[in-house]
Each structure stands twice: as structure tokens, then as C-alpha cells.
Amino acid sequence: MTRRLLRGPRAIAAGGLLLLGAALLLHGTWIPVKAAVAQVLLERSWQAHLEGRVVKPWPWADTQPIARLIVPRLDVDMLVLNNASGRSLAFGPVWVDPSAPLGGYGNSVLSGHRDTHFEFLRHLREGDRIIVQTTEGMETFEVRSHWVFDQRDEYIVLSTLDRRLTLLTCYPFDSIVPGGDLRFAIEAVAVGAGDRSS
Amino acid sequence: MSRLIRVVVCALFLAGTGQAQNLDQVSSGELWIGGDEQWAIAPVLSQQVEMTISGIVITTKVRQRFINDSAQPVEAVYAFPLPDTAAVNGFRLRIGERVIVGEIREKQQAERIYSRAREEGRSASLMKQHRANLFTTRTANIPPGEHIDVEFQYLDTVSYSDGLFSLRYPLAVTPRFGISDSDVQLPGYQAAAPISLKATVFMPGKPDLIESRYHDVNIVPLGPAWEVTMESSDTQHDFELIWMPRLEHQPKAEVFTETVGDETFVLMMMMPPQPVASQALPRDVIFVIDTSGSMHGDSIEQATEALLDGLSRLRRGDRFNVIEFNSDAWALFPEPQPVNAHTRNEAETYISELLADGGTEMKVALDLALTQQGDSGQRLRQVIFITDGAVGNELELFQQIQADIGDARLFTVGIGGAPNDWFMRKAAQFGRGTTLRVGDVAETAEKLEGLFARLESPALKDLCVQWPAAAESYPQRIPDLYLAEPLVVVARLQNQVDDVEVCGKSLNTNFSQLLTMDKRMNHPGVATLWARRKIESLMDSLVEGADTARVQKDVTQLALDNHLVSRWTSFVAVDSQPLQLSNPKLLRSVPQTATPAALLMLAGAVVIGLALWMLLSVPGIRQKGRGGFRLPGEVDAS
């Protein structure tokens, strides 16, 4: 019986399927690995950026780290990229144009994959501190609220009176299929500068 | 670059001065404007105020005109004070010929509506309350080269003191200091907005006196009323109009009613009885004087004069002490001292050397005055607190006063161009005393004379109003009645009544008066004032430890029902037509942010599983024949 299996065209088809399955698995596994590896490669480019030099994270890179995002309680420390194409999202969370520049007034919006970099959003609680480092310096934000919305009928207000950070990702977190119109948002407000009583 | 305002430039404006502030931290009477990432273009603001006074109800209509002389649509934020007893109950936006009526909404909902309108390029305006006496209007998308009028209306009652009626419209501003921001001068555009004001006072006959305290006005008779007009850009003083009706017509108490549906709202204003020869009790008088930086200049001069005046009015048998506070507090004597030439001298020297500098740590001063002055025994303890009230932690201070007041009475004396009236009045209320506002150096002595005379006179105590059953009246605890100061009580009655009895006790006699209600006269506004007082009473209950969620729910409902701006409700008006602009850039869609990793792995696992199943279950398929699962190429194989 085994011999027959190894020979027939049916066996060839099954072997092909095995190979396809392995390739799919590998591809699926590669995505989170790439997400993690990219952050390591970005680190060198970020250090150069802080010193005012431009160093590409990898030779064919079309994106640049522009800020560092730190959540002390969750041990999150990652680099934020400047280009919100689907490609950059594979390597890190991105700053969304035309939101307020990081470190400036208004609402700065960052977006990241719900199953890699921004998976931690589900663990953020009100009151958590988020630190954003740019070439301008460090700024601390405090998480005020989170909500889920349908991106077809709501949009994010960019002109706010304060310095604000909105972190966006897809929702629900555990959905197998990518896509869909639900988004999960974290809203954080700058504390520290201008808030002398705290 | 976005054609819309991407950042509200108030923030940028302040950033330019090196101070990051939000609206809670700024002083009143300030105008900020924004444009497309430029804040330097200042739209002109002008104000038009129309007041109508009938009986004791004032209806005020304010029109703020924002002019945008730039080429960009801009947003303007205007923060301004209103009398802290005001009930804002009307709001609209006028763009050219179009009028957009504002709607009262739960505060956050109103903000969302406003933000969205702004993003969509529609003209919109939002009016909300920041503190009890600080309101803001925010107006988005003022068209380039155009103007927008923001109009609102509020109700208030006239004040009556020492035989004079008076009303105020706040024009002056004062910076507020929080606990740790004591010596920071807040930046900002001091609104030197040209203002034109018209007040129509309905009053039978010619008044003995009608005048404006600080501004030049025109007064002409107009039928049964007097019309007062003023044009000015003086923001040194608030506008204050005083008038004295002919004394022979002056009643002791008046009632005003308004019927809404089957409910009757009643406003009772009770004038104090004529002064009687005073049988003064010996007193312990604790003078507390604010010497913080905000008191610098005229204010400290006024305050010193007030202190010296108060000192001179003390009598043999009284005891006194003087406490000074800024960043800390110091007492002249460790305990109140008897009045004699020696202590008087010492105090006068001390007072004349006071300097205004440093922060406003009122808490320490109150503690020193209320809990560390020994025992007064049979004496009447009166704490006279002289300050501009430029503090940011009012609630905390009210709690402290409520907890520590004991048998003492707290009297607040508001000094300076724009003292924090709300703080003054509430502090006195929690301290079971009264408040006095001194607006100008020249009148300090005269006004204080009145206060001290009042303090020396016996008060009418244990006041009661015999409302019929099912009446809901405010204030719930009726305070003592001091001479030359009226008492206002508002009530909602479920059923019709003809008269109400008022009673009380003076030092040695009982007082009582029967008030008859005239239902033929409907006084619009009484119901609104009742709602406003009820909201105030609910807000006060927070200081006494009421459940915030419950108070919020009650206040929100009451405010929505009565179209009132409150801490939890705002007015919002949105134009239905967007401005004709090139496409505004909006964050309308957000990127897709999920990887196919899980899906790929799942598919991989399924495909491998399928392959394995094929390999292991071939015989099964064979036995079942060709009706089963078949792969391409399988036909050839068989």
C-alpha cells in the first residue's frame, strides 16, 4: 500500500499539497519574525537619526524610523516609521499622514498591525503612561480611553486643543481573517509639559 | 497643506510664549484665533449687549462678532466670565442672513458634533461652561473675509443692597492661580473688545437715582422704562448699573410667579427690616488679608485701607487678630488680643508694612483663622477675609470651610477689578456669612462702612417660608438675614396657592409677613431661575460628599429640560452648508492593520492536513468508488 502511495499521480498531488502547506506555514511564520527582525535592523538607523545622520535600515528600505514608542508597564519598546503604506506596517507602527506631527500640538495618529506590533493595545489600561521619543525630546502621554468604531462612518478628529496621541489598529484582535472595517483606538493625552501640578 | 485648521491655534499661540496651557488653566476674557497653522492673524471681536430688567429678572442678550480678515477660514476661542448666578438658556449662530439655532446637548456629545462640523468645513459654534463663572464660545470655520455672530442669552436676578438695585456685566479679567502656578503670569490676548451695551430698566415713576458706576452712559426715559446706553472699550472695570426706586414705593417683600403647564414657579425677594438700635455683642474679629502677587498694586492698597478701617471700627470689649497670607500664612498675634491703644498701634504698623508678593495658599490661612485662634467663649467670632479670590482649588476650600467653620461666621470681601465672585459668594455661604465686593479704591471706605455696620447689627435668624406641601424651594437652608441685604428664595409649586407666610426671629421679637401672589402677572424667567438654583444646589451637594454620578445625571437632565448650559451640558450650533473650500484633508479611513500571518498559517496547516489525509486514507476512497473525493488527474489514473 505504501509503495502505491509513493508512486501514483495521486501521491504526486499529495506531495505537492504538502509542499504548498509548508510554504504557507513558512510564509505565515515569517511575518511575525520579519516584524521582530525589522525592529532590530531599524535600531541602527534610529541611532543615526538621533545623531542627525541618515542611514537606511536595509539597503532597499523605503521607510525611516521617526520616533520611539515606550510603554513601561507592558515592557513595550518599538520604533515608529514615517510611511503608512502596507509595506512599512510590516516593519513597525507608522505615523499616519496628515495627523499632527509627533511632538507637536494636535492629535498624532499611529497605526500598527493588531497581531504584531500593536497587539499590546488590548492590554493598555486607562492611566498607563506612553512615552514618545523624537529628535525633539521625550513626551509622556497618559491613556484616557479606548473605543471600537467602524471606519466607514467615523473619523478621527485631528485638531485638538492639546497634545494627543491616538493609537489605531484593526479589530477584533483574535480574528483569523484580515480586513473588515472595525478599528480599535486608544486615546492618550500629553502630561508633563504645561501641567505643572502633576 | 490642509485648508482647514489642523491644530487649534490657541495651543500654538500659547506654545509661542513657552507656556503650554489648556482652557482650564487660562484666565477669563481671552480671545484666541487659529488659521491654517498660523495663529498671528487676529480676527476682530466686538460685543453687543442688550439687557432688559423687569421686576428683579434680568434678561441679557449678548452678540459676539468675530471678523476674519485673513484669507483662511479660522477658528476663534473666546473665554469670558459671566455672573456666577447666570443661567445661559439661549444660543444661536448668525452667518450673513442665516440664523442657526443652537441646541442643548450633553457636553461630550456637543463636542463631538462640533468637532465633526469643523472637520467637515461647516461653520459651527459651541458654548460651554468651564467653571461656575467662566464660559467659552468656540467658533469654527469663520469664512475668510467674513464675520460670524455668536448670540446667547442668559437670565439673572438684580442685586439689592443698602436700598440700591444693581446689575453687573463682567468686562474686566483676572488671571486665576492654581496651587502651584502661583507666580506665573498667564499669557494671552487681553480682550480689549469694543463693547456697546443697552440696558432697559422697567420701573414705574422716576427713580431717585440711576447711574453707571465706572463707565460713561446715556440715560433717557422710554415709555415706562429707562434706557441706558454705553459704548466703551474699557476693560478695567466691570459694567455696573445702580438705581434706587422711590423709597415710598418700596415694599418689604415681593413675589413674582411664572406658570408653566400646571406648575407654578415663585420667586420671593425679601427686603430686610429697618435697622433697629444695635445691641452689639462683644466680638472676636479675625482679619485675613491676601498678600499674594495678584493683589499687587491698587488691590493691596484697597485691602490695607479696608483693614485699617475695620480696625478703627472695633470697640472696647472686642478682641481681634490679623492674618496675612501668600505662599504661607502668618498671624500678628498668637491669639486674638483685646482692643487697646497698644495692640491697635502694633496692628497698624504691621498692616502698613504689608507687601503683595508670592502665591495664594488660602488653605493654610483658613486653617490658621478657623482652627487656631483659641476659644471665643460667648463672643461672636467673625472672620473677615479680604482677597481677590484668584484661586483654582475652590471646591477643596469650600470643604475646608464647611468642616472648620464651627460657630464662627465667614465674611468675604472681594477686592480688585475682577474678584472671583463665585468663590466669594460660595465661601461666605459655606461660612454662614455674607460677601461684599469692592470695585474701586475710591469706594472702599464707603462700602466697608456698610459691611461693618451690618456685622455689628443683630441679624434676623431662623427664617422660614411656609410653602404649601409639595413645594421644592431653594436655597434649602435659608441663611440669616443681614440688614440692608435681601433674601431671594425660588420655589416650584405643584398646586395653586394664594399666599405664603414668611417668619423669623430678630434679637428679641418675632417677625412675620404674609405675601399675596398676583397670578395675573406672568414673569418669564422664574422657572429658568428655579432650575438654575436647583442645579446650583445639586452642585453644592458635591462638596458635602454627594455621589457624583447621581448628581451628574440629575443636573444633566434638569439642564437638558430647561435648555441650560451646565457643567455637563453645552450648546452647539452647526451650519448645514459647508464652506466652499478645496477638499479638506481628513483622516477618513485608517490603514488596514492586520497581517495575513494567522490566515496563512491556518491555510498551511489545512493544506498539510489534507495531504496527509489523502496519503493515509486512499484505500477508503477506493472502496467507496468514484463518487467520493477526486483530484485533478485522478480520472486518468483509474
Image (tube, coloured by chain):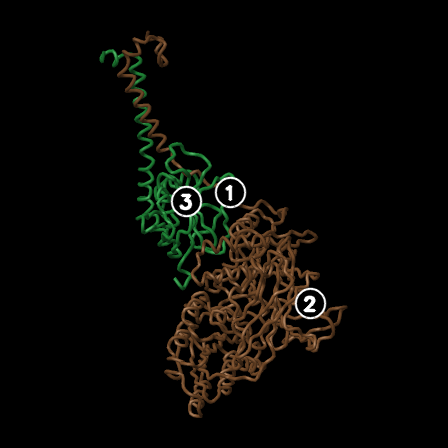
Question: Do the residues marked 2 and 1 share a common chain?
Answer: no
Considering only order in the chain, which callout, 3 or 1, is on the residue closer to the N terminus? 3
Q: Are marks 2 and 1 in contact (CB under 8 Å)?
A: no
Measured along the vertical axis of the image, is residue B326 above or below residue A198? below
Q: CA distance from mark 2 to mark 3?
A: 57 Å
**Mark 1 or 3: the one toward you:** 1
- Which quadrant of the figure has residue B150? bottom right
Q: Residue beneath label 1, please?
A: A154
Tell me the SS state at disc 3.
Answer: strand
Q: Can marks 1 and 3 be said to lie on one chain?
A: yes
Q: Which residue is mark 2?
A: B198
Q: Mark 2 to mark 1: distance in Å?
A: 45 Å
Q: Position of residue B128 (x, y in %)?
A: 55, 57
Quadrant assignment for the C terminus of chain B: top left
* Chain A image colour: green
Q: Given the image, on which type of amino acid does mark 1 rest?
A: Glu
Secondary structure beneath label 1: loop
> Does any portion of residue B82 appear in the rendered image?
no
Where residue B319 sits, quadrant-wise, is: bottom left
- Say left or right for A144 vs B502: left
Measuring 59% from the left and 48% from the top, which residue is drawn there? Answer: B121
Residue B36 is labelled as none
Q: Which residue is mark 3?
A: A94
